[in-house]
Image (cartoon, rainbow, N blue to C red):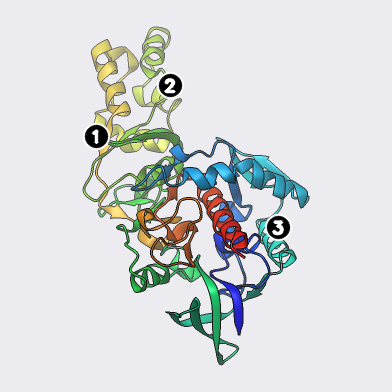
Amino acid sequence: MAYETLILGAGAAGMMCATRSGPGTLVIDHAKAPGEKIRISGGGRCNFTNMYASPENYLSQNPHFCKSAMARYTQWDFIELVDRHGIAWHEKTLGQLFCDGSAKQIVAMLVEELKAAGADLWLQTSILSVARTADGFQVEVEREGKRQQLTARNLVIATGGKSIPKMGATGIAYDLARQFDLPLTDTRPALVPFTFSDDRFKPLAGVALPARLSNARTSFDEALLFTHRGLSGPSVLQLSSYWREGEQINANLIPQTPLFDLLRSQRQEAGRKDLTTELARHLPGRLVDFLAPELGLKGRLADQSDAALRDLCDRLENWSLTPSGSEGYRTAEVTLGGIDTDALSSKTMEAKTVPGLYAIGEAVDVTGWLGGYNFQWAWASGVAAGSAIAARR
């Protein structure tokens, strides 16, 4: 069967590409339903973009690569599409936009849009082989127990990364890149919880608080969550993209609290209070109990000198930790790294050395922060490739 364009992957980027690439487009995916990562994102409500999305919110060996696509298809363009489909949404925090209803609304919108554009969608379709031909590409697939040969002038790699393998994620994007001699950057789990081999935080599982997590390169002020295996929460997930094995991280447990002044004031007004009792007014009680032996938290407020209070606050602002690792691709929201952007056109997402071959979304070495940024890259890169394909007809 002959097509103008074959898109491998019915995720956010692949479906978005199909809405722009024109008739004669076929999207194929091995899953039973399209947009599975969309469906589970944002607690089932899909954090579909961020009001503040800009190139500064992305990691890549070439930080300039994403600028072209993102300038030509912005968060406001996607919001307009969502509004046009009558999908109600709200801003949660830090510019994060979620559906009021269900993430399935975003999936349904994309399916409706790609079909309106003349594209077809095949699910439960396995890719057996991909080859280059004189006129484009040949892809052998298995569908409904039968093998079929598909040909196309254009081929789009939109198969994502390795994150969340239980959703069917594989490294096929990287296998295809190697097959066509496209260079790869190192890949690793990103937006992922930290683990500690000694299970030291098991007693604190479920405790959360605002915190500033930092390393030598950056810092994030968001919630910190203790888990049975280590640390999670938005601040940890954000920092994980900038962390490498063996590196130390710092946790400021009182980033917005003038604790020294508060403790000194209370020392005057209620000096007979236990120090731990007063600290539990500003930090979770279980965390205070956990830190008490390490920080020597004992005695009454009246027993604490200014120097002792200052030392306590300094230690709460600079709690040094060294994770043993991360939870890996099993829970990572995205894959950091991928197909090297040097091999692609930033305007069209087409491979420079393989005409008609495109790579978009998470498969490419462009990784966004937590908070809707990765979806915005999927929309923008998908539109860039789809529009370029349509323009070449």
Between the residue at mark 2 and the residue at mark 3, the CA separation in whole angstroms equals 40 Å
Question: What amino acid is at disc 1?
Answer: Glu
Residue sitting at the far left: 246
Where residue 344 appears, as percent x and y from the top left, is 41, 57
Q: Is residue 141 visible?
A: yes
- Give the residue pinned by disc 2: 257
Residue sitting at the far bottom: 146
Q: Is residue 225 visible?
A: no
> Which one is earlier in the sequence, the residue at label 1 or at label 3?
3
Where residue 162 appears, as percent x and y from the top left, is 41, 64
> Which one is earlier in the sequence, the residue at label 2 or at label 3?
3
Picture residue at 40% right of the left edge, 26% below the top: 255
Question: What amino acid is at disc 3?
Answer: Gln
Image quarter of residue 261: top left
- When the figure is inspected, residue 332 is found, relative to residue 138, above or below; the finding is above
Question: What amino acid is at disc 2?
Answer: Thr
- Give the residue pinned by disc 3: 105
Q: Quadrant of the N terminus?
A: bottom right
Between the residue at mark 2 and the residue at mark 1, the CA separation in whole angstroms equals 21 Å
Picture residue at 41% right of the left edge, 33% below the top: 211
Q: Nearer the viewer, residue 341 or 370?
A: 341
